Amino acid sequence: MFSQSSISGPAPPPSSVGVSSLSGEETKENMPPFYIEGWLRETKTLLVFPHCRLCRFKFQEDDVVVVVTLNNKHSKPFLYAYHDSHMDKALNAEIVCTSSADKANGDHHLGTGCHLTCLHFANKLDPRHAVREAEISTNLTEFHHELPLSGTTVTKAAYKSDLFLVYSPKKQQVTDISNKLQVVNINSKRQRFDSHAKEMFMKAKLLLHPNKGKPMSRLFAASLYTYEPPASEEKRRLLHIRSQLAMQLSKRFKSRVSLPLDIWKSISDYLVSEFAICSMLGLPFRDSTEVSTAKDIWATYAKIDGISYVSKLANKRGHGAKLALQARDMAFEHPLYILEDHLGIREIISSAQPPAHKAGISAWWRVVPMEVGEKISFATDSLKLHYSPGGKQPLGLGRPVSPDNCLWSKPISPQDIDQLFFYPSLAPRAIINMVSIPINQPICTGYSVCWVKIPNWKSERKTGAGLVYIHAHQPGETFSFYEDVTRYTNKYVWEYAPKVKGERLTELSLLYNRNKCPPHRFTMAFRTSKKRDLIVGPYAEKISPGETITWKNTWGWDSIATFSDFDTDTLWMESPRFEGGTSGFVIGPQHGGLNRSRYFNPFKPLPPILPNPLPDRLQDKELFQSSASLSGLLEIVICRSRAVGLYPRVCGLLLRYEDSSEKSVGSFRMDWAERPLSVPGKSPALFLNFLQDESRCLIADLAFFPQDSPAMFNTWMELSWADELVWVCSWNDSYVYSV
């Protein structure tokens, strides 16, 4: 039903989808099927994503972290720092603390990063990993990670020995290990904890499916995220675990210790990570599944952190199973709408129309066309299921972007997907999360596009500009989205394109390097019904002072979307999904056919050259260039930066003309806009205060009459009202000139 399908390629090695801590006897036969594909190789670089693969909480700055490889080798503990890298002699590999923006391919594989304390605790649950315990204990002592509590010292061991039983489901028959809340001396902690832990494991292992992967391996496999969840999910999960643990502790020790629930919540703060680890071990092992759509499909669920995930699908009703799909609904070849998040599948629906959207920003929709009697396959990560055509892990890097590896922020019909143009591009990640932007809504007043600086962990000088957000403005809206989008960086540019009354967007074109898949950077051009081109983004790969801006070699414009002349459309862009991430893919509908062109022919010529000399602060930077006529101006609105720690500066201008049209230059945010300044009729020119030294290059102020220059590096630039104002900026630096 889809017009395009995924192109198969070589299966990624297991380290490209995650690595596990395996003992020497762990083989492909007893590894979780979801992670069997591929072959183990020696790696030169290990990428560590920003969450612990045991407790699944995000790493904080200076957390003590250790990396585990597939053959159960451990790195030396190190202090975590996002976007930091170092060489580990124990593994003879470079460890890079990065995000899911970086691909794992070639010599770059994913490492299994864990808190050192979490690894220490998890090893107690599996004696087969005790060979590493002496080393881990030494590392713990080295980093001084004993828990200091004020007043009476209650060791974490006393609680941890009961954590598994506190969590374990009521139906599980497990003998009580310890019912005493013990206050022990810190010196006897390790011996007492060891005895409790070994006994606890002997009871806990009965809950695990025999010969279906070791406990540690299953934890690593089931905790691999398909994408980085939003910060709100981290907060929700923390509050849920804290609340559940506090209630369980209160009930378990109610007969011996009477404490207010708030005290138990305070105690649970010290045990959240350990409780999160134990909660996963209480879940039964699940195999991969293949079911027929000719029969009813029953689903069994596993609850993780308060959310139910599909752990088993079958055509026969099993214990605790619920009817998920009826054969009579699937007989009409209705598509499947699969609601899933970073951990797995939450819900499966068969419907002729897209279901009502009820998912938050932490859950996404997958659309799967179906045929009568077709069999569908789901792969397991040992605890829960993931959609997988053919029963194997399909989500590899380096495959073309297609509907098969896209998730949608709201349900979309297969017919609407067929209208989208998937231009040739390789998937930057295993799963592409697509978020919707409304286009041509009647109440829309304009569009804002945000670009951020992309750091390169190999070189500080090699940076790029990445798209993170497209916003359609409406009257009376709040401006909280500005801070939400840029709260992780102060290196950004907001480009604002006001809309003329009655104007509609008609076409979207992208300028990108076709040799780079996915394109690391691109420029967008929106064409309007008023014969205007709204061009946003960095212009070219390399621009030198005095050089004409041209699109050479593999650079070219592709028309990727044509919008309806009457209705509201939807533009889709890849969601960044994590702190500091960017979008590498934008797609839209093809109303009236696709008009692709190698070279973009603008209605109005672009600024042909950059000034020579260009200020030093703008050399070798990503440059954003915008221009507007100064003729016929009625008002000027200043956008003045309020960023903490930066010298006050004018980021951009909104120019309002006598014909009621508007145009913005520079970086413009509505929440930083000042009161409009009327242009005096007697003003001889526009004067901009330009401040330049070794640490800054900026526009400090604006005036309508001549001003004195207070210092050598502080000058006033005069621009005639008959000129074209050109604004060049790069993150926090700006420069203007006229043509």
Image: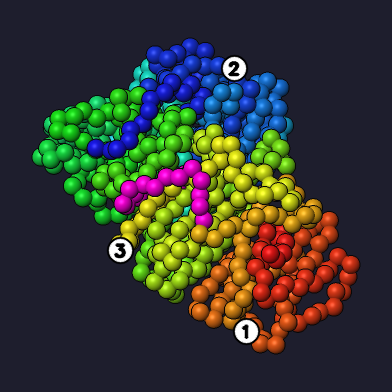
Gap in Å between the C-alphas at discs 1 and 2?
67 Å
**Residue 667 sits above or below residue 25 on the image:** below
Say if the magenta span includes residue 591: yes
Badge 2: residue crowd in 10 Å (few <14, some 14–19, many ≥20): few
Q: How is the image coloured?
A: rainbow
Asked if the residue under mark 1 is in contact with the one under mark 3, i.e. CB atoms within 8 Å, the reply is no
Q: What's the residue type where badge 2 is placed?
A: Glu
| Residue 368 percent location from the top left of the image | 27, 38
Marks 2 and 3 in Cβ contact (< 8 Å): no
Looking at the picture, does residue 282 appear above or below residue 360?
Answer: above
Residue 584 colored in magenta in the image = yes
Vertical arrangement, residue 531 with respect to residue 590, above or below: below
In screen coordinates, is 182 left or right of 444?
A: right
* Amino acid type of the residue tagged 1 in the rendering: Ser
Question: Which residue is nearer to you in this view: 602 or 75?
Answer: 602
Foreground mark, 1 or 2?
1
Amino acid type, label 3: Phe
Q: Which residues are magenta?
A: 578-602
Residue at point 77% right, 54% down? Answer: 612
- Name the element at disc 2: loop
SS of the residue under disc 1: strand
Q: Earlier in the sequence, mark 2 or mark 3?
A: 2
On screen, residue 215 versus residue 653, left or right, reads: left
> Tag count in the figure?
3
Q: Is residue 115 visible?
A: no
For disc 3, the marked residue is 566
Residue under numbered circle 2: 42
Q: Identify the element where label 3 is drawn.
A: loop
Q: Tell which of 181 and 460 is nearer to you.
A: 460
Q: Whole-percent x and y of residue 228?
A: 49, 43
Quadrant that contains the N terminus: top left
